[in-house]
Amino acid sequence: MLVAVRRHGETSAIIEVFTEGHGRHAGVVRGGTSRKIAPILQPGAQLDLTWRARLEDHIGAFTVEPRRSRAGLLAERVPLAGLNAICALISFALPEREPHPRLYEQTQTVLDLLGESAHWPYAYLQWELALLRALGFGLSLDVCAVTGAQSGLAYVSPKTGRAVSAAGAGEWADRLLPLPAFLAEGRPPEPGELSQGFALSGHFLDSRIARGLAGKPLPAARQRLLDLLGRQSGAAR
Amino acid sequence: MSEAPRDIENLIEMMAKLPGLGPRSARRAVLHLIRKRALLLTPLADAMHQVAISARECLNCGNVGVTDICEICASEKRGNGQICVVEDVADLWAMERGKAFAGRYHVLGGTLSALDNVGPEDLRIPRLLDRVATEGVNEVILALNATVDGQTTAHYIAEQLEGTEVAVTSLAQGVPIGGELDYLDDGTISAALKARKSF
């Protein structure tokens, strides 16, 4: 799946793809700015790729064949913002050439749901949590880290990402992050609840991933998606 | 191979930086110019000097011209209430070649790009909103590329214009003139099918 494309010289392009077996991988596409190939190289497109390089460390060159385009999303404002957010986060967060087959599969699922199902924003939130999990910062939301209770979970520790029950939080409650009820109960969110989930995933994306990357801010594409979703749910209410 | 004199080498190096030219083709072009000095080299140098002095960006729309306000913006005939938003001056020239549009333009100077950190403030979007508010505009035509970045930008502009009286339209997407369905990608076919009209 193509994640990003940048012009390289006059006729070539450097693309970043997210693959099942090799994770995020970059390579040159010769003639990538030509009228024949440029339309294929759009973020979200599924490609058949062959990579060749003299040495493993080299950036190498891809030959590309189109498999499936996601051009249908271009006309839809919010799903297109979803596609941008997914591509931007993959490019931002995933280390190069580290395979994440499970995340790859979940990425395909959420991309297929964009614009097709009313529940795609929830699937997108689950994808953000899966991204955190793939990078080793998965949240543990099914048992209280203090008491071991499996019910009454109301908070998440901003440091460990583990759930805490209201009883276990005690006087530390105001230092903990609120755990949205739908995530604790494992059910789809009610209108308006989703933003709490994004606040939670956003905290960990920022504190665990962005700060580890020399303090780079999270991609603006994610905030744009959240703004659009917020406006959409505000208009629906 | 003996090197050409320094001045000529400089010219070759400069020419090699032009799009479509590499060092070898620049060398051939320079040799050709020297051979046709009176016919090509001197007039070309004069023309380049003239353009270097006079070329500037239109303060209103971002088009390239020789005055602060370009001919299109200055023309009363083009003030029909329509503004066509394009990404680049090359797109404006392409639209003008078609002679199908009689309104004015607005050149954004790029598209929003999350990966390259291009935000709305890096483009001429605020100026577009000013123009819509002050020029009596009744339609904004978004003629941006059918790419993810182009359409993301188009949606952003449409969003900024929500709540105004201005109609926001975009170019149609689908089968090109002379195109054969068999050669089209599935995305284009799906866009064409969605934008079908009664016949």
Image: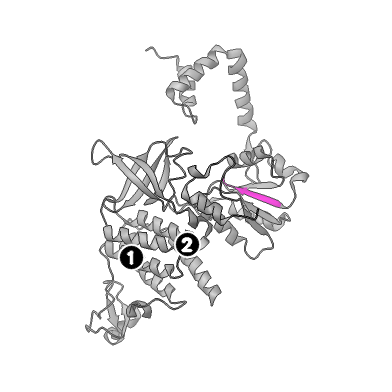
Label 1–label 2 contact, CB within 8 A: no
Residue A64, quarter of the rendered image? top left
Residue A207 is tagged as 1
Indicate whether A96 appears above or below B162. above
- Where residue A81 sits: x, y (%)? 47, 60
Q: Is residue A149 above or below residue A98?
A: below
SS assignment at label 2? helix
Q: Residue at horizontal 60%, vertical 49%?
A: B143
Residue A51 on the magenta segment: no
The span shown in magenta is: B82-87
Q: Residue at x 78, y 45 (%)?
A: B76
**Location of residue B9 (image quadrant):** top left
Q: Residue at x 47, y 29 (%)?
A: B17
Q: Is residue A148 above or below residue A79?
A: below
Three-letter amino acid code at the position of disc 2: Pro
For this view, does B80 lie left or right of residue B117?
right
Decide: few, some or many residues near mark 1? Use Cα within 10 Å; few <14, some 14-19, many ≥20.
Answer: some
- The mark lying in front, picked from 1 and 2, is 2
Report x, y in % for residue B128: 63, 53
Residue occupied by mark 2: A79
Q: Is residue A57 visible?
A: yes
Q: Is residue A59 visible?
A: no
Q: What chain letter is assigned to the residue under label 1?
A: A
Amino acid under disc 1: Ser
In front here: A143 or B53? Answer: A143
Instruction: Read off the chain for label 2.
Output: A
Compared with A230, B132 (above or below) is: above
Task: Tell if the residue under mark 1 belongs to the same chain as the one under mark 2.
Answer: yes
Residue B12, percent across and down? 47, 21
